[in-house]
Amino acid sequence: MVTKMKMRPDARTASSLRRQLILAGIVVVAATAVALMPRAKLPQVGDHWHARYLVVICGKPVPDMPLTRGAIHTQGDGVIHVEPKTRAEAGRNANLGRFFATAGVTFV
Ligand SMILES: [Zn+2]
């Protein structure tokens, strides 16, 4: 006697696999969308940006800082000049922390 068994997909397994494939597809689409999003514009090597600044302590404006050195500096004009020369000074590293550090300013 020969018994034939017809193989049929388990409904729960097929449904679970379908959900996993849909989820994987969504993850791939989302990852691709994030990878293709334009990055926020940040100062890069060779850029020269200006940002006016004002320091106020207890409601009183402090005079402009004198000339400072570095990729992110001021010329005593109330403007921060952002001029990264290396990648280490560019992008997210071109920030106020770097400006104040090279100017010798500390916050206590
Ligand atoms: Zn400048």
Image (cartoon, rainbow, N blue to C red):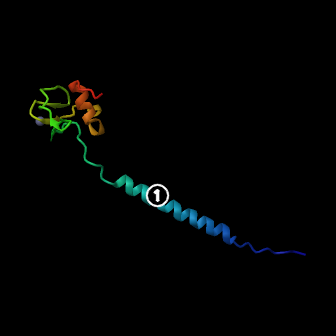
The quarter of the displayed image where residue 56 is located: top left
Indicate the position of residue 72 as horizontal and vertical percent values.
20, 32
Mark 1 lies on residue? 28
Residue found at the very far front of the displayed protein: 58
1 vs 97: above or below: below
Indicate the position of residue 98 as horizontal and vertical percent values.
26, 31
Of 21 and 68, the residue lying toward us: 68
Observer able to see residue 86: no
Q: Determine whether, in the image, residue 52 is placed left or right of residue 90.
A: left
Provide the secondary structure element on which disc 1 rests.
helix
Look at label 1 and name its amino acid: Val
Which quadrant would the C terminus be assigned to in this image? top left
The quarter of the displayed image where residue 21 is located: bottom right
Of 54 and 80, the residue lying toward us: 54
Of 38 and 108, the residue lying toward us: 108
Specify few, some or many for label 1: CA neighbours under 10 Å numbering under 14, 14-19, or 20 or more: few
2 vs 60: above or below: below
Query: Quadrant location of ligand 1?
Result: top left
Residue found at the very far left of the displayed protein: 77
Q: Residue at 67% across / 69% down in the picture?
A: 12
Observer able to see residue 23: yes
- Ligand 1 lies under 8 Å from the Cβ of mark 1: no
Report the number of numbered marks. 1
14 vs 30: above or below: below
Residue found at the very far right of the displayed protein: 1
